[in-house]
């Protein structure tokens, strides 16, 4: 029997151009794809997230077969399924005469540690290929970070712009004379009957089968399958990409920070699940956005704002994740210890902004970045919720959440758990920011203008209590100088009332 190379394809490696496939002979290769319980349950992933990934995997396997590859696909309900990646590698080595294993590096520490043991465990050569779908290699990020006192995304982002040439003029300068147009991207939105809508993809037979499996096997996981809307093939993902580029991108910049009651998507792309699982190529997408700007079809603030999210933030947090190491998840600079409130899993709260963000998260496995940062994340931060618990929640509930991208964004950017490696200050705010960027406060039972009393917006007292209880660690932060001056200028009775109000609210959680 001819010896074969075993090429495992993981659930976030659904790309045609995986490095593990490059230069391989199809008749000497077996592609192994695995639905394993260990990956679906190491945290309680949202039902729609599991259904998306499994369905996208099954569709990808079909297309790989149509392109001439031999694909051995192990479904979750296969009676012989071992439940783990390593167990399925062992079973595949029994089914075939395998002389080597070749795999693209995993995105997470946990899985990489598993892969790095396979050569000794199975006594066959294992080649781990770099994931060249990213712009920056691990070494390039480490070289950039070496010796720097502060690892600010903005400066890394400029390096990525120079490397890719995106939005640079013929002299290598940034288009429009500035690298960043974020200041122009903070407009509140108004309800608009002409607001673009993302495509809702009806589940086909494969997806329906997966949804039935998920409903049965993961009934105790959060979220609903009733509103499943994701693309599950390359072709469907490309259709949503076209929808965004043609109908939403031009206004994405202006309104990317806006929030409206009953409008979960606004002008956002809804492409991050497809980029992170491999159905869309991030650099190809960014190039098309830059081309649309060059052709005069979208404004610079929209093009730059979108590109920055991908070649800036996405690449940067991956670099931070691998540089900081597995213990990053346990960091807790502010020593926040409060348990995560139950309403994060039910949406049952009378704070309308939280009810909206959490409700749509449970329905759709989606919320945009400002809802995550300034609503659910901001509340957890100022309420003193344990950042590891917050990290687990975000990893569970969002379809685009893989630990390498979610953990630094949550623990570092949102919860300041790393003490300022990512964020130059904690992203804490009172209700005023939410009132400015949304219409939630006008319909909430709480009054955003009140700081104290039963009708006062809880964000207000919690914000000042957050500053007060963390003053020893945060007072020297230059970006918090003004809030601390305001706090210290308050009458001591007012300070006490604010802190007492915050504590009374927290006790009711």
Image: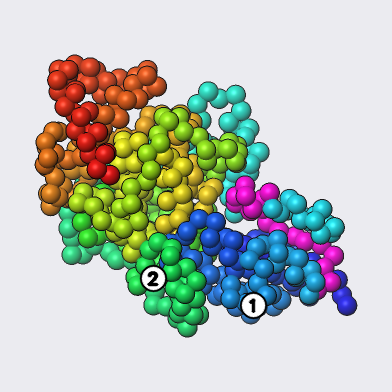
Residue at image location 55% in from the left, 25% down from the top:
148
* Quadrant assignment, res 414: top left
Residue ID for mark 1: 79
What x and y, as percent, mark residue 94? 80, 72
In depth, the one of 211 and 497 nearer the eye is: 497
Query: In terms of sequence position, does the residue under pointer 1 or pointer 2 come before the other?
Result: 1
What x and y, as percent, mark residue 249? 34, 56
What colouring does the structure picture have? Answer: rainbow
Residue ID for mark 2: 225
In depth, the one of 266 and 400 nearer the eye is: 400
Q: Up-down: is 45 above or below 34? A: above
Q: Quadrant of the N terminus?
A: bottom right
Look at the image and give the residue range highlighted in magenta. 96-113
Q: Residue furthest front?
A: 507
Q: Up-down: is 201 above or below 196? A: below
What x and y, as percent, mark residue 161? 50, 41
* 482 lies left or right of 317: left
> Does any portion of residue 319 appear in the rendered image?
no
């Amino acid at each position: 029997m001819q010896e074969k190379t075993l090429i495992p394809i993981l659930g976030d490696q659904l790309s045609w151009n995986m490095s593990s496939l490059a230069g391989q002979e199809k008749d000497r290769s077996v592609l192994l794809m695995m639905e394993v319980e260990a990956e679906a349950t190491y945290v309680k992933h949202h039902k729609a997230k599991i259904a998306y990934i499994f369905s996208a995997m099954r569709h990808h396997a079909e297309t790989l077969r149509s392109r001439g590859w031999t694909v051995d696909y192990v479904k979750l309900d296969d009676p012989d399924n071992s439940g783990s990646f390593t167990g399925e590698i062992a079973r595949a080595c029994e089914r075939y005469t395998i002389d080597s294993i070749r795999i693209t590096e995993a995105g997470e520490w946990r899985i990489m540690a598993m892969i790095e043991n396979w050569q000794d465990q199975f006594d066959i050569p294992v080649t781990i290929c770099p994931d060249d779908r990213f712009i920056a290699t691990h070494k390039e990020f480490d070289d950039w970070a070496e010796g720097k006192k502060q690892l600010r995304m903005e400066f890394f982002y400029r390096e990525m712009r120079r490397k890719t040439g995106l939005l640079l003029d013929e002299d290598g300068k940034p288009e429009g004379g500035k690298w960043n147009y974020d200041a122009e991207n903070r407009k509140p939105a108004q309800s608009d009957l002409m607001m673009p809508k993302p495509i809702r993809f009806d589940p086909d037979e494969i997806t329906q089968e997966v949804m039935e499996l998920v409903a049965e096997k993961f009934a105790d996981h959060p979220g609903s399958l009733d509103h499943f809307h994701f693309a599950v093939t390359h072709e469907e993902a490309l259709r949503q990409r076209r929808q965004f580029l043609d109908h939403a991108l031009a206004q994405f910049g202006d309104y990317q920070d806006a929030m409206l009651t009953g409008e979960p998507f606004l002008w956002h792309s809804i492409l991050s699940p497809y980029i992170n699982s491999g159905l869309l190529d991030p650099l190809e997408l960014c190039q098309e956005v830059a081309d649309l700007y060059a052709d005069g079809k979208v404004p610079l603030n929209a093009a730059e704002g979108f590109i920055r999210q991908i070649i800036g933030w996405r690449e940067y947090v991956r670099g931070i994740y691998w540089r900081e190491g597995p213990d990053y998840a346990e960091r807790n600079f502010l020593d926040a210890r409060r348990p995560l409130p139950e309403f994060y899993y039910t949406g049952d709260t009378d704070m309308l902004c939280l009810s909206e963000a959490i409700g749509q998260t449970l329905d759709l496995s989606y919320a945009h970045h400002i809802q995550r940062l300034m609503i659910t994340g901001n509340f957890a931060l100022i309420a003193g919720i344990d950042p590891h618990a917050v990290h687990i929640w975000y990893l569970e509930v969002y379809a685009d959440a893989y630990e390498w991208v979610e953990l630094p964004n949550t623990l570092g950017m949102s919860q300041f758990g790393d003490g300022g490696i990512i964020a130059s200050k904690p992203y804490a705010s009172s209700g005023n920011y939410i009132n400015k960027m949304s219409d939630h406060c006008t319909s909430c039972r709480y009054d955003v203008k009140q700081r104290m009393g039963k009708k006062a917006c809880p964000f207000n007292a919690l914000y000042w209590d957050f500053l007060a209880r963390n003053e020893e660690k945060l007072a020297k932060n230059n970006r918090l100088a003004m809030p601390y001056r305001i706090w210290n200028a308050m009458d001591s009775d007012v300070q006490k009332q604010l802190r007492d109000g915050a504590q009374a609210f927290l006790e009711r959680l």
